[in-house]
Image (spheres, rainbow, N blue to C red):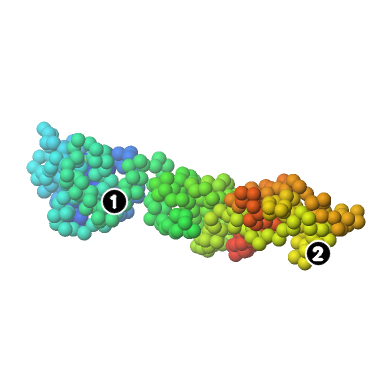
């Protein structure tokens, strides 16, 4: 490309910053076909944005200007000769025409012979934005994001004393053109690790929210060649930025044919360790991960969503699984009658109530056995029943129920509300529920294939 004639180039000042980039992105819409030139140095906070948008902005390294002839030089965010010397020194000849778009005050070493467009705006981007608004030029959302970042950067997020109404007006226009505020926020606090800006941007572009049983769950799905270092902090950043109840980031690594799920949660009742155990992973209730091998990433994502639909039920309590029609016997019922009743009902025991209907004990087939051996089948049940009865309230959580059933090694748990029996919960009811959960989990494991957990 040596010694060709370039119609025009857009440059910012050396060590270009976010406002430079914003102004350049907009200047390229005013001057289509012009090269956008990247300075040798990029201001460190602007580097993630440059990395992300190099292709979109089609940035040409300044060294490619060497020996070229340029008809039209467009300078943004400076009017000082010293700050554009880097480019001018490379050119074969001075440009025939120079336009400057700047928001800095004039100085003694301004570029000679330049046509100056200026204004006391908070950012140079605002100046260019004003011109685009007047010309009604359609904007690409990426340009809007880049430009809005420039305005935020140079106005200290609209808090500096240089801020004008025009800055707000152009910001509104950029927002209307599809600028992403979450990306702007990201660029203002640049991530240190290389490549993470790109990852963050791709995650942000691939977010979807699903409302599952009253929870707002965020998902992202991304295909990558291979695993990369430090994915978790980026997932964390998305979680912090978007503030969902829970976030599941699913990555499919093509070369490994493996899927990584990273999950974060801030809501009680969502137990990520339990959920991701189904996918061969683990962790904590609020942070967990899983790696699934052999199953296509999309299929893992589908399975995950379906599993959540079915397992994110509101937390169950005793009242949800108890039997409400409780068969009871009175204290005076004979052991024989009680035995016949239990046999007929196929029960192994039942609560015993006093005259007022209040719970006074519990009788089991084992208690009746004792009476039978003693030849006392006509004795009242109160002589053989257990008087210390373990009970629970209707609001007891499943965890509490489990605790009671296991530590007391009992098969029945009468549920009392203000002293009255309102239900009964058996070990069998409880185990059936747990079995249901296990079977659901197992069906998903099977679906993910035998290779899923190698
Ligand atoms: Mn500036």
Above or below, comparing residue 307 to residue 410 in the picture: below
Q: Where does residue 253 sit, x and y in percent of width and height?
A: 51, 56
Residue at 78% of width from left, 49% of height from top? 386
Q: Which of marks 1 and 2 is nearer the N terminus?
A: 1
Above or below, comparing residue 423 to residue 194 in the picture: below
The residue nearer to you, when weighing 336 against 453, is: 336
Residue 251 visible in the shown view: no
Q: Where does residue 32 sit, x and y in percent of width and height?
A: 19, 57
Kindly report which numbered mark, 1 or 2, lies closer to the viewer in this rendering.
Answer: 2
Q: Residue 269 carries which label?
A: none
Residue at 48% of width from left, 59% of height from top? 212
The residue nearer to you, when weighing 415 against 43, is: 415
Above or below, comparing residue 159 to residue 72 in the picture: above
The residue nearer to you, when weighing 184 against 296, is: 184
Residue at 82% of width from left, 58% of height from top? 334
Q: Place residue 412 in its image quadrant.
A: bottom right
Contact (CB < 8 A) between labels 1 and 2?
no
Which residue is disc 2 drawn over? Answer: 340
Q: Where does residue 353 sit, x and y in percent of width and height?
A: 72, 54
Beta carbon at label 2 within 8 Å of ligand 1: no
At mark 2, the secondary structure is: helix
Report ligand 1 position as a quadrant.
top left
Q: Which mark is residue 145?
A: 1
């Amino acid at each position: 490309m040596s010694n060709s004639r370039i119609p025009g180039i857009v440059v910012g000042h050396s060590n270009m910053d976010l406002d430079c980039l914003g102004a350049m992105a907009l200047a390229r819409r005013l001057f289509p076909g012009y090269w956008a030139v990247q300075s040798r140095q990029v201001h460190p906070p602007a580097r993630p944005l440059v990395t992300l948008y190099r292709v979109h902005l089609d940035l040409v390294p300044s060294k490619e200007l060497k020996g070229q002839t340029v008809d039209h030089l467009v300078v943004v965010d400076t009017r000082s000769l010293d700050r554009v010397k880097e480019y001018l020194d490379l050119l074969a000849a001075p440009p025939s025409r120079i336009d400057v778009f700047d928001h800095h005050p004039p100085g003694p070493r301004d570029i000679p012979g330049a046509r100056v467009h200026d204004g006391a705006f908070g950012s140079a981007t605002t100046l260019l934005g004003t011109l685009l608004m007047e010309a009604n030029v359609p904007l690409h959302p990426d340009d809007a994001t880049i430009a809005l970042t420039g305005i935020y950067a140079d106005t200290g997020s609209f808090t500096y004393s240089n801020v004008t109404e025009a800055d707000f007006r152009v910001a509104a226009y950029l927002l209307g053109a599809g600028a992403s505020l979450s990306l702007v926020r990201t660029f203002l606090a640049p991530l240190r690790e290389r490549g993470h800006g790109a990852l963050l941007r791709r995650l942000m572009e691939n977010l979807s929210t699903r409302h599952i049983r009253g929870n707002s769950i965020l998902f992202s799905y991304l295909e990558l060649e291979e695993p990369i270092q430090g994915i978790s902090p980026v997932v964390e950043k998305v979680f912090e930025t978007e503030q969902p109840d829970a976030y599941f980031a699913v990555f499919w690594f093509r070369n490994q044919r493996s899927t990584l799920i990273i999950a974060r949660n801030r809501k009680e009742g969502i137990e990520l360790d339990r959920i991701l155990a189904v996918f061969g992973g683990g962790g904590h209730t609020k942070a967990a991960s899983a790696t699934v091998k052999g199953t296509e990433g999309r299929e893992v994502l589908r399975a995950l969503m379906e599993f959540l639909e079915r397992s994110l039920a509101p937390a169950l309590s005793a009242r949800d699984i108890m039997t409400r029609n409780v068969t009871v016997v009175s204290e005076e019922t004979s052991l024989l009658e009680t035995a016949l009743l239990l046999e007929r009902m196929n029960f192994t025991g039942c609560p015993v109530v006093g005259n007022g209907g209040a719970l006074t004990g519990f009788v089991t087939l084992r208690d009746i056995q004792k009476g039978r051996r003693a030849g006392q089948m006509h004795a009242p049940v109160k002589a053989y029943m257990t008087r210390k009865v373990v009970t629970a309230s209707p609001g007891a959580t499943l965890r509490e129920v489990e605790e009671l059933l296991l530590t007391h090694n009992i098969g029945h748990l009468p549920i009392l509300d203000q002293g009255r029996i309102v239900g009964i919960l058996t070990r069998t009811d409880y185990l059936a529920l747990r079995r249901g959960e296990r079977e659901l989990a197992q069906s998903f494991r099977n679906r993910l294939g035998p290779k899923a957990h190698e």
